[in-house]
Amino acid sequence: MATAAARTARLVRHLIAFTAVAGLTLSTATTSGADTEDNAAPPAPSSSAGDAPPGWRAFGSYEEAVDAGPSRTLEEAAAVQQNSTNVAEPTVLPADLDVPLRDDVGTLDDFPYDDEDLVDPEMPLPSPGMYTFESCRADFPNDRERPMYKNRYASCLEARVPYKHYRCASLGCWHSGTTWFTYTQIGFGHRDGTWINFWYQLTDFDPQLDAPQSNELSIDIVCDAQGQATCPPGAGPYTRSLAEWDAETGFTNVGFELDDSPPSGDSSYRPEDHVSLHSARTILEGEPQWGAFESETTFRCDNARYLTPRGACIFDDVQSVHYIDLLDNSILEEALHVYAAYNNPDSTYPQIPNKRIPGDQSVDPAKRLSRMYWGYDPTRYRLNNQTARRTCTEEYRGYPGDGRDCDEFPYRSTYEGAYWGVDHPDDPYSYSASAINADHNEKAGRLLGAWYLADRILHRDRFWVQVGCGPFAEGCGGSEPPGLPGDNVPPTVDAGPDVSGVEGSAITLAGTVTDPDDTPTIAWSVTPGPGVDPGATCSFANAAAPSTTITCTDDGPFTVTLTADDGHGEPSPVSDTATVTVTNVAPTAQITAPASGEMINARKPAPVNVTFTDPGTNDTHTCRVDYGDDDGPVEGTVTQQAGSGTCTAEHVYGFDGLGPRTITATITDDDGGADSKSVDVVVYVPGAGFAIEATGLLEVDRTPDVRCPPDDAQSTATLNTLVGRVGALNVSCTVSTTTGRTEVETSVADVTLLNGLVRITDIQSTCTADAEGIERSSLVGTINGIPIGAGSGSLSVLGLAEVAYNESTTDTEGRLVQNAIRVRAAGQEVVVGNCRLG
């Protein structure tokens, strides 16, 4: 039995600890047995008068409430821990927590104990979180009627209480007003002794109508015991006026030492654990007409020596959950085993169709695990282990000689362990056994044993096991973790970030593959996405290397998949994907003909030849050539192979297309990428001219016959022919290589034809063609003494010859012809002073 001095010292330690957490300042002055603090609360909104707070029991008086006792029977109180639905914050143990084992325990019939049963009960544990008045008021839901819990050592209760005032006269009493206030209570269990504390505070007073603040309010927290257990008397009730409670800035502490309490005697618990079940009932009493209100908080104390030698008190109306973190690499294989047991039980050993694994609260129906302390049921403890080890030996080659441990789930330290199915052959629940990394198994066992200590899990206490990502074992970000392989850890595959690049060029892929116990086979694959042209392909520089490059023949989105297979079956092979976005690259064009500055005959087809290349070897192409005149572009003929091709086109400029011209060829791929190249050319028409030509009975060749290009000029002083004499004739023909201008000039001083029948003087013809247009003209001095000039026409000479002058015609080949003189007579034709274009 603790001395009064020891109890006082412990109370002071916990008061100091709480003030450090809550930020309170304790005062040494007390009023009616209450400690005080400076902690002003914000005003509460006004409310209408009401009855008892939701979930509180109403009584006629304080005495009636005390006499009523706890609301639960002994059996109901014993079942609180087993069936609680209250969810608290997880008990999270630090990843680097040192969990020492006892060295004073041998073996059990040559079977070693599991590590969770060897954890030193004297090991230091992190302090559980505690409520402050502020956090309790902030977290407590408005619609909650019963206490809430941060963990098994911290409770919180808040209620908005209507204190009703009454006025009485000879004819009776009536309700005259209401004072509303907020009652906040926080509770503290303890790991280092069987005692418990409650602190309470009143805030946010709001008197309405006729509500005298001199009326008194009594508050007490009464300890009740279940069964054969006992409770020490409290120091209350504390009675003050409403004004005094409102003026109080501190809090009131009520504590109960349970060292002297015998066990409650319920058969759910072992007598050796010295379990006593209790209720802390908060009672508020006002005026007689108002009566008393009561709210109940259950707690449990024990002296189980396999936990801590000094005993402890906890709040038992809290679900017990053991959390396993898939992201903790030091227990990865254990975590994967439990995950596989929950999510794919049929794949685990022993392979029993439709088997269920208990412990998972997320399934329906769900079944909790029940802790089994080996010292209370050594036979069942041994049978659990024998059953699991037999499965590991049968199913895992190399075990037990390869240094692995046989991990069983549910745990050996539970009644639902491996022997459950043997003992209950008609029950759908079974177990899973897996040979896993010994270090992972040992570390997981130590953490389980430390959790047993931290959450005070007694023999036959029920609990859940939750496996997930992070210390709270939550979801894994939308992707399931890998399942447990038969006898190895599967590869971890990451295809790397999404990447982008251009077609025909290498794009870097930064994939990674890790496998702690194998060298897996690695392979990249690729799938074209929506909109990718048929025939597009991609190739990898090294498809068997996680870090490599990919080159695609066309643009678009592609999904690349990195796969690793360790050869051990499910869940291997393991894959991950990334998106490669490939953009188009325009083709590159080159005009090979005509050459820059080349002279183009406007009367003949002008061929254009283009070559092109494209890194997108799956692209198709079109070609368009603009010749730089008014006729518009010409569609070229494309001949192509993967990544290159040619284009040909033709166009006749004609007389309207003369002069300097720019030819532009454009190659366009099927994705709209284009490249244009240009070349400057000079378009011209050939020129020609002669002084005289005769056909018919007498033949005289064109004399002199001058043509261009190239430039030419010929002169003759006098010429005697079969048809007559020609004097002083000149013919010149030039084409400009820069402007394309063609000039043809012919002159004859005089001519006498047909034995003097026709005499003509001063004959000239001129033909020019350039970008400005076509001009033809001729000039005749006299015909047989008759002045002619530039006009065109004809005249008859003695009815024997017809002489046409200044004549513009087009020959049968489309050439433009200017004849100064054309004489026809009796089967004879003579042309004098001719120029031609084309």
Image (cartoon, rainbow, N blue to C red):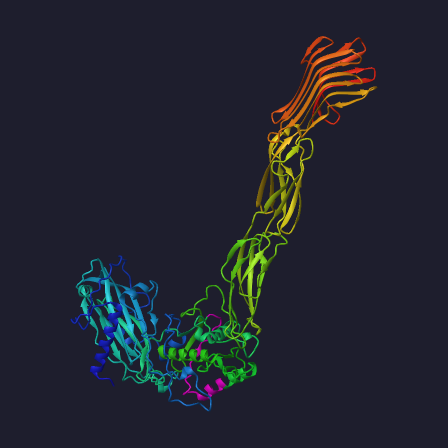
Over which residues does the magenta segment extend? Answer: 362-385
Which image quadrant: the N terminus? Answer: bottom left
- Identify the residue shown where x is 78% and y is 11%: 756
Q: Which quadrant of the structure image shows residue 729?
A: top right
Q: Position of residue 434 (x, y in %)?
A: 51, 79
250 vs 830, left or right, is left
Q: Position of residue 786 (x, y in %)?
A: 71, 8
Q: Residue furthest front?
A: 717
Q: 277 or 491: nearer the eye?
A: 491
Q: Position of residue 100 (x, y in %)?
A: 37, 82
624 vs 120, left or right, is right
Residue 363 lies in magenta, yes or no?
A: yes
Which image quadrant: the C terminus? Answer: top right
Residue 790 lies in magenta, yes or no?
A: no
Number of marks present in the image shown: 0
Q: 131 or 17: nearer the eye?
A: 17
Q: 789 or 229: nearer the eye?
A: 789
Residue 172 in view in this figure: no
Residue 562 in view in this figure: yes
Q: 654 or 445: nearer the eye?
A: 654
808 vs 525, left or right, is right
Q: Position of residue 568 (x, y in %)?
A: 57, 74
- Residue 47, compared with residue 814, is above or below; it is below
Q: Residue furthest left?
A: 29
